[in-house]
Amino acid sequence: MIKKVDIKDLNQRIKQNFPYVDKPEDSELCFHEKGTCWKCDDLREELAECNGQKLTGASIRDIHQEMSRLSAKGWRWMLPSLLRYSLTQESLQNQSEVEFLIYELGPAPEYIDETKQRLSCLNDNQIACLIEFLKWCRDSEGSPWAGYFNKNINRAIKFLVKI
Ligand SMILES: [Zn+2]
């Protein structure tokens, strides 16, 4: 029997497993070193004013297509906000932010190594929580991603269980 994940339980699990953390130093925020990649430098600048532990919905929308430019520490900082945001009405309507997260978590073969690097600051419980989140997206009636996004979600789950 498949155990369905309830949105309240999922919210609770996200809060338990993804406490907010401080923003990493500028030099450690992005995937590539300062001055070596204009895309990462751009993102550093975009995030210059987000100095706290939390990212607002507006900031998440601004950067959601650029998640792959964050370092492992950058991901550890961004995910607590992104996952909480993912279950809000705003995100359920926009859908795009979570779709990009799902793409990021189910990389094409040539991006597997760097994706593993980006997720390397997460602990086992956090990876398990990400899998729960993906299962909710796939299986829940309240999820706008259920059905049409299953192929991508399954790919992401398959990737994460092997990490
Ligand atoms: Zn870069």
Image: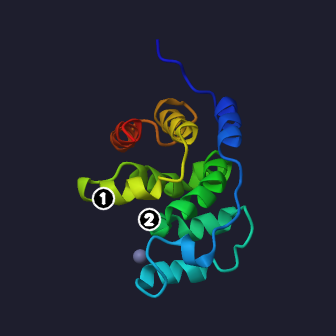
Circles 2 and 1: CB distance less than 8 Å?
Answer: yes
Q: Position of residue 62 (x, y in %)?
A: 58, 71
The residue labelled by disc 2 is 68
Picture quadrant where residue 78 is located: bottom right
Residue displayed at 71% across by 42% down:
15
In the rendered image, which quarter contains the C terminus?
Answer: top left
Q: Position of residue 139 (x, y in %)?
A: 48, 30
112 lies left or right of 124: left
Please tell me which residue lies in front, 45 or 28: 28
Say which mark, if any, is on residue 7. none
Q: Position of residue 64 (x, y in %)?
A: 52, 64
Residue displayed at 73% across by 62% down:
53
Q: Is residue 23 above or below residue 111?
A: below
User: Could you tell me which secondary element the residue under label 1 belongs to?
Assistant: helix
Mark 2 or 1 closer to N-term?
A: 2
The residue labelled by disc 1 is 111
Q: Which image quarter has ligand 1?
A: bottom left
Q: Amino acid at mark 2?
A: Ser
Q: Position of residue 109 (x, y in %)?
A: 24, 53
